């Protein structure tokens, strides 16, 4: 099946620094990728929808200047958490759908990135 | 009304039990439906798609009722390895909308 690779799996950074997370679709093209955040014991919350070659669409309440998304190719989207603070510590997950498939095609998820800001 | 509602549980059931999860969704324009499972501190993984006529995959049966905007998942003969959080996921437009999940613990 389709594979989405996310890197890094976990990262610890100092408050005020920036962290970049990469999401790659390995064997399919993804015109659209999704970025989610999940706090402990809570559900996945969509942060933004990333479209190849255009600006990302952010959900209400998500700061686009803080969470920079770049989707430069059909197989790579990146999320940069800028000036990270402890409250940004969370589990970040990307997902993608195969652009060629129909409506009943599921989303494939990356392994997730556990970010801890100290 | 929330977009997707699920009973958070936890459902604590003995091995071999049959357990059912329900999910309601608010957007009648939802085009596709999925059940995902998520293990602690891991990414969600697809359990099964949900088709209009209902579908079965081994011990798992999914049903969809578009008129009532309701989806269900039935697990028969529960195994210890079924312990996870089960996420109901309607899809519309370009978005997968995740429910809060129902936590299942299968006990020996």
Image (spheres, helix red, strand yellow):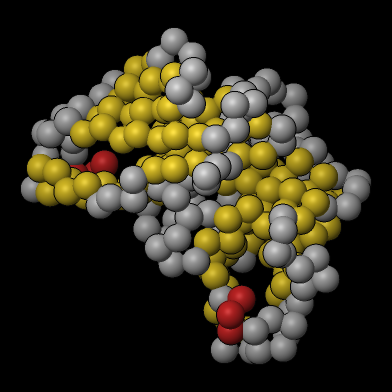
Expressed as whole percent of the image width and height from the top left, the position of residue B48 reads: 44, 28
B58 and A28: which one is in front? B58
A20 sits left or right of B83 in the view: right
B71 sits left or right of A34 in the view: left
B97 and A115: which one is in front? B97
Position of residue A41 relative to residue B63, above or below, is below
Number of marks = 0
Position of residue A96 relative to residue A68, above or below, is above
Expressed as whole percent of the image width and height from the top left, the position of residue B85 reads: 35, 48
**Is residue A14 at all visible to an observer of this figure?**
yes
Residue at 72% across / 64% down in the picture? A62
**Is residue A27 at all visible to an observer of this figure?**
no
The residue most toward the top is B53
Residue at 72% across / 58% down in the picture? A60
B11 sits left or right of A74 in the view: left
Expressed as whole percent of the image width and height from the top left, the position of residue A30 reads: 75, 38
Expressed as whole percent of the image width and height from the top left, the position of residue A33 reads: 72, 45
Residue at 11% across / 33% down in the picture? B16
The residue most toward the right is A53
A18 and A43: which one is in front? A43
Residue at 83% across / 57% down in the picture? A70
The residue most toward the front is B1
Q: Quadrant of residue B62?
A: top left
Q: Quadrant of residue B55?
A: top left
Position of residue A97 relative to residue A36, above or below, is above
Position of residue A51 relative to residue B63, above or below, is below
């Amino acid at each position: 099946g389709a594979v989405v690779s996310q890197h890094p799996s976990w990262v610890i950074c100092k408050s005020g620094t920036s962290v970049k997370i990469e999401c790659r679709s390995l064997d399919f093209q993804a015109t659209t990728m999704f970025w989610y955040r999940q706090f402990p014991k809570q559900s996945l919350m969509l942060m933004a929808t990333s479209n190849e070659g255009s600006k990302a669409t952010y959900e209400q309440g998500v700061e686009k200047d803080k969470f920079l998304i770049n989707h430069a190719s059909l197989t790579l989207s990146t999320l940069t958490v800028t000036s990270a603070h402890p409250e940004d510590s969370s589990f970040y997950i990307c997902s993608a759908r195969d652009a060629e498939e129909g409506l009943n095609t599921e989303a494939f998820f990356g392994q997730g990135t556990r970010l801890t800001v100290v | 009304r929330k977009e997707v509602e699920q009973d958070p549980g936890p459902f604590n059931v003995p091995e071999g039990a049959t357990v059912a999860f329900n999910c309601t969704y608010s957007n009648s324009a939802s085009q596709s439906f999925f059940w995902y499972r998520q293990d602690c501190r891991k990414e969600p993984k697809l359990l099964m798609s949900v088709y209009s006529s209902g579908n079965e995959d081994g011990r798992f049966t999914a049903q969809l009722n578009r008129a009532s905007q309701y989806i269900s998942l039935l697990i028969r003969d529960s195994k210890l390895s079924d312990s996870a959080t089960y996420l109901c996921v309607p899809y519309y437009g370009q978005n997968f909308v995740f429910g809060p999940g129902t936590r299942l613990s299968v006990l020996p």
